[in-house]
Amino acid sequence: MDVEHVVGSPHPRLRPFVTRYSGYRMRTEPGIHRGLPSRSLTLVVTLDGTVDLADGRFATLCGGLHDEAVIITHDGFQHGVQCDLTPLGMRAFFGLPAGELSGVTVGLDSLDAPAAELRERLRHAATWTDRFALLDLVLGRLVRPVRQQVEVAWAWQRLAAGVAVADIAAEVGWSRQHLSARFAAEYGLTPKVVARVMRFERANRMLRGERRPTFTEVAAACGYTDQAHFNRDWRALVGATPSEWIAAELPFVQGGEGGAGAELAP
């Protein structure tokens, strides 16, 4: 396994819209990779080849929020740049609510982005730091004024803090049904589902840590009823049990995070 994975931070001006950049160059056995549910939308520009999904093959893409794994098939070589976008970033860069892409992936060119030009310039950049700086420049030019409904934006923040949906509805003075409808219109998923995805993210981060905890410890720390609940939820979101995912993909993920040539963008 030959894996290079470089993580960079966007310019401070862009951080409400992009949480991180990831550059990757990987040679592994041919197979599949699971794109896991998260609170971020995914923008990818390949430097070689394509990203091969059930929806098609993409040289550049943007994928919305989802509550199940996205299966990516590959021939053993993957090379590109990924940007993790916040839902607000979808509005800032493309003028659309995140709900417009819920559960689907589209080519970046369909969003009126300079997809071909961006890919060509990234391919000719000399270093990952240069590529991240180029993303800062291009994305910075796309930023437009954005506005979200205050109650809906507040609900997202409170879910991230672990507040229950019923409590959030009471805070904003809406019924749970009205909150769910307005929230889903903006993000494409209901508050209950987003809370489930955010809990899964916390569990996933724990399993990627230097000291891998037991499943029982993860379940307790992340608010699952018990380990059986944790296992069921993981299988529903990932399409595999935690043990199966660890065996198939954690070495790949950890190899990437500590891979050769890693550098951080300033």
Image: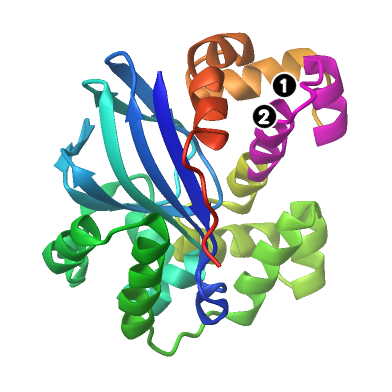
Location of residue 217 by image quarter: top right
Q: Amino acid at mark 2?
A: Arg
Q: Which residues are magenta?
A: 198-222
Image x and y of residue 246, in percent: 59, 15
Tag 1 residue: 230
Q: Quadrant of the N terminus?
A: top left
Q: Is residue 262 above or below residue 84?
A: above
Q: Amino acid at mark 1?
A: Phe
Kindly report the distance in space between the C-alpha atoms of the residues bearing marks 1 and 2. Answer: 16 Å
**Camera-side residue of 220 and 206:** 206
- Residue occupying the point 37% across, 45% down: 103
Tag 2 residue: 208
Q: Is residue 68 visible?
A: yes
Image x and y of residue 262, in percent: 51, 44
- Horizontally, residue 258 falls left or right of residue 198, namely left
Kindly identify which numbered label has been placed on residue 249.
none
**Camera-side residue of 25 and 45:** 25
**Camera-side residue of 63 and 188:** 63
Q: Secondary structure at mark 2?
A: loop
- Horizontally, residue 167 falls left or right of residue 175, namely right
Q: Residues within 10 Å of mark 1 (few under 14, many from 20)?
A: many
Q: Examine the structure image and report whether residue 34 is included in the region drawn in magenta.
A: no
Work out whether mark 1 precedes mark 2 in sequence or the reverse, and give the earlier one: 2
Q: Secondary structure at mark 1?
A: helix
Q: Is residue 96 visible?
A: no
Chief secondary structure of the magenta span?
helix
Viewer-nearest of discs 1 and 2: 2
Q: Quadrant of the C terminus?
A: bottom right
- Residue occupying the point 34% across, 37% down: 25
Q: Examine the structure image and report whether residue 205 is included in the region drawn in magenta.
A: yes
- Horizontally, residue 226 falls left or right of residue 236, namely right
Location of residue 200 by image quarter: top right
